[in-house]
Image: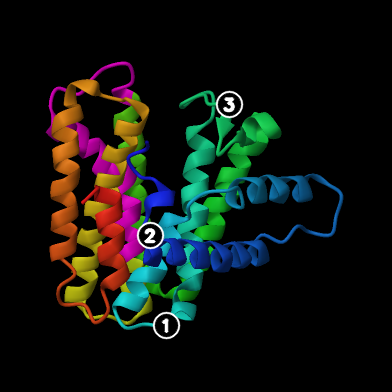
């Protein structure tokens, strides 16, 4: 049994994930149209599409949409930002998988981009997805670009910390959580805050949703560790911390107009 089992997700979460995947994949498909050429530019876009349109939960773009609706906004207003988040996430995966980083051969049940294409194309595909992500965010608002830029920097720091710690166990749960908050939590925080921005929410709602996203993103990474058997010395403490983060996330939603699906999402991710 996995710590985060899609088959055991609440009905509202299952529906959000399915609807978000359909809408965001359609949005990315439109944005990543293959040029009508038979040269290297077409191959590059094919590699970008291979990464971005691969199977996956789409939990981050679903969070953008869910947060927008929870803050009183319309789903349509969140689609550009949701696509931006998923393209940026895909860029991080492409680069993380490279031989110079995690050196992975498989991602989401099929060869990684550098195996399916080649290493140079994978680097360029990641660069292209990052560029496309900011282009999409710019269509949402200047505030969306600022949030995505700030959180992207945190993600890079998280990856640097993770690489520096490779092969060793952090000295404490707090040290491990610092990596988790940056590498994983930051993009969840960006997703939730982007949803608030797309709903034209007030500053307090933006702040609360950003904190909510950080909490469930960190809980998500703890769950992933449990699934993979990583850091067994912290297993019990991490499981308890995961639940604590879930309770924290739920408390942050008490002033939103329609927090229902976000409450269910927090409960599912944290194992409440």
x, y percent for residue 240: 14, 39
Q: Secondary structure at mark 1?
A: loop
Q: Which residues are magenta?
A: 164-192
Q: Is residue 182 magenta?
A: yes
Q: Where is 106 relative to 263, above or below?
A: above
Instruction: Pick the residue in front: 98 or 263.
Output: 263
Q: Residue at x 13, y 32 (%)?
A: 237
Colour pattern: rainbow
The N terminus sits in image quarter: top left
Instruction: Pick the residue in front: 43 or 24.
Output: 24
Mark 2 Cα-neighbour bin, 10 Å: few <14, some 14–19, many ≥20? many
Q: Which residue is tagged 2?
A: 148
Residue found farthest to the right: 38
Q: Is residue 19 magenta?
A: no
Quarter of the image for residue 236 reads top left
Q: Secondary structure at mark 3?
A: loop
Q: Which residue is tagged 3?
A: 105
Q: CA distance from mark 3 to mark 2?
A: 28 Å
Number of numbered markers: 3
x, y percent for residue 39: 84, 47
Instruction: Pick the residue in front: 6 or 30.
Output: 6
């Amino acid at each position: 049994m996995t710590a985060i089992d899609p088959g055991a997700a609440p009905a509202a979460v299952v529906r959000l994930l399915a609807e978000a995947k359909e809408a965001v994949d359609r949005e990315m498909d439109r944005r990543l149209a293959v040029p009508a050429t038979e040269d290297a530019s077409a191959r590059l876009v094919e590699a970008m599409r291979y990464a971005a349109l691969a199977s996956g939960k789409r939990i981050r773009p679903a969070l953008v949409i869910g947060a927008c609706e929870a803050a009183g906004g319309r789903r349509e207003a969140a689609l550009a930002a949701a696509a931006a988040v998923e393209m940026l996430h895909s860029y991080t995966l492409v680069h993380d998988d490279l031989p110079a980083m995690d050196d992975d051969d498989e991602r989401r049940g099929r060869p990684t981009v550098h195996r399916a294409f080649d290493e140079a194309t994978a680097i360029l595909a990641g660069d292209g997805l990052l560029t496309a992500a900011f282009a999409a965010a710019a269509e949402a608002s200047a505030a969306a670009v600022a949030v995505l830029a700030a959180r992207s920097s945190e993600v890079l720091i998280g990856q640097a910390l993770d690489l520096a710690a490779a092969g060793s166990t952090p000295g404490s749960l707090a040290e491990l959580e610092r990596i988790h908050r940056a590498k994983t939590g930051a993009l969840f925080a960006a997703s939730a805050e982007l949803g608030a921005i797309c709903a034209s929410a007030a500053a307090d709602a933006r702040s609360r949703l950003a904190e909510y996203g950080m909490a469930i993103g960190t809980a998500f990474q703890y769950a992933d560790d449990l699934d993979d058997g990583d850091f067994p010395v912290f297993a019990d403490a991490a499981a308890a911390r995961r639940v604590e983060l879930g309770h924290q996330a739920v408390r942050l939603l008490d002033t939103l107009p329609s927090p229902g699906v976000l409450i269910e999402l927090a409960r599912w991710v944290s194992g409440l």
